[in-house]
Amino acid sequence: MTAPLAHRIDALGVAHPPAPGARIVSLVPSITELLCDLGLAHLLVGRTGFCIHPADTVAAIPKVGGTKDVNLEKIRKLAPTHVIVNIDENEKPTADALAAFVPHLVVTHPLGPRDNLALARLMGGIFGVEEAAECWCADFEAEYAALKQERAGPPRTVLYCIWQDPWMSVSSDTYIARMLAELGWSLPALPDSARYPRFAWSEELVGQLDAVLLSTEPYRFTEAHADALEKQLGIPVFLVDGEMMSWYGSRALAGLRYLRQLRAMLEG
């Protein structure tokens, strides 16, 4: 049975025909994991070096560079029918170059947690695993309902840090911010209006905050960083799993459970 057309339309509005026998290169780590979880690992002929989950499965899939520094010649030699890219993670010039020789460029752009439902159905609809995708979506809906059924705490303002030297955070127009919003948490206003704004610590900034969250990626913050910063600022500082907060696809399902733990940690 062919998946509905609506399930095969990507982020640019391109409708992709069903391709159950595709040769796929994934340039998006979280989607590589999702494809494997949907039973499509055997169709993957290439991945980035950052596609690390599930480790045992992806070890056998050839690497084609990183998410930003893609080796186009390696991809060309793999002769994929489909390359999966993401608007935030991959460069547009790379996508344009790939479109010149790859039959199907599947563009993704999840903006918030619930966009993972459409993402799973897109992968399932194109690559012939609609039933597996619907099972995944049912699991996601159950976890989302469990999150929403819990009693919400008071609104919180938290600063989510992704880098130091210089210190950097995330704007409200990010997947991470929308994950935090599921808990009723918001980000402080920062002078820098960039998507990933730089900031300096000040009494005014700290005075707005209920807590600081240090992400384990892309900067590898540790508990030692959190302990030192908490002593410096005098407010709660927590180390958070960056994959759970920023990876969509498979990790988003675990991410909903993680949000419940994060709420308990801050409210506790």
Image: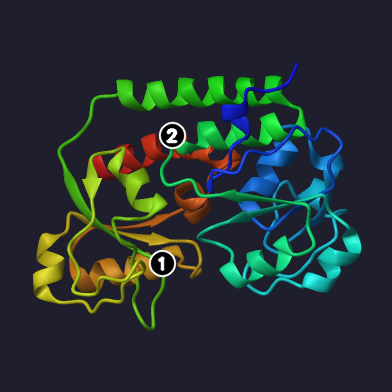
Depth order, front residue of 256/191: 191
Asked if the residues shown at circle 1 and circle 2 are in contact, with their CB atoms under 8 angstroms apart, the answer is: no
What residue is drawn where x is 54% and y is 19%?
138
**Badge 1, how many Cα within 10 Å: few under 14, some, many 20+?**
many
The reply to whether residue 91 is visible in this rendering is: no
Amino acid beneath label 1: Ile
Amino acid beneath label 2: Arg
What residue is drawn where x is 63% and y is 38%?
15
What residue is drawn where x is 44% and y is 39%?
258
Mark seen at residue 140: none
Classify residue 3 as left or right of residue 144. right
Residue at far top of view = 1
Residue at far bottom of view = 165
Placement of the N terminus among the 4 image quadrants: top right
Classify residue 245 as left or right of residue 195. right
Which SS class for mark 2? loop
The reply to whether residue 200 is visible in this rendering is: yes
Classify residue 253 as left or right of residue 65. left
The percent position of residue 107, horizontal first and vertical second, equals: 60, 51
The percent position of residue 45, horizontal first and vertical second, equals: 85, 52
Residue beneath disc 2:
114
Residue beneath disc 1:
162
The percent position of residue 133, horizontal first and vertical second, equals: 65, 26
**Tag count:** 2
Which SS class for mark 1? loop
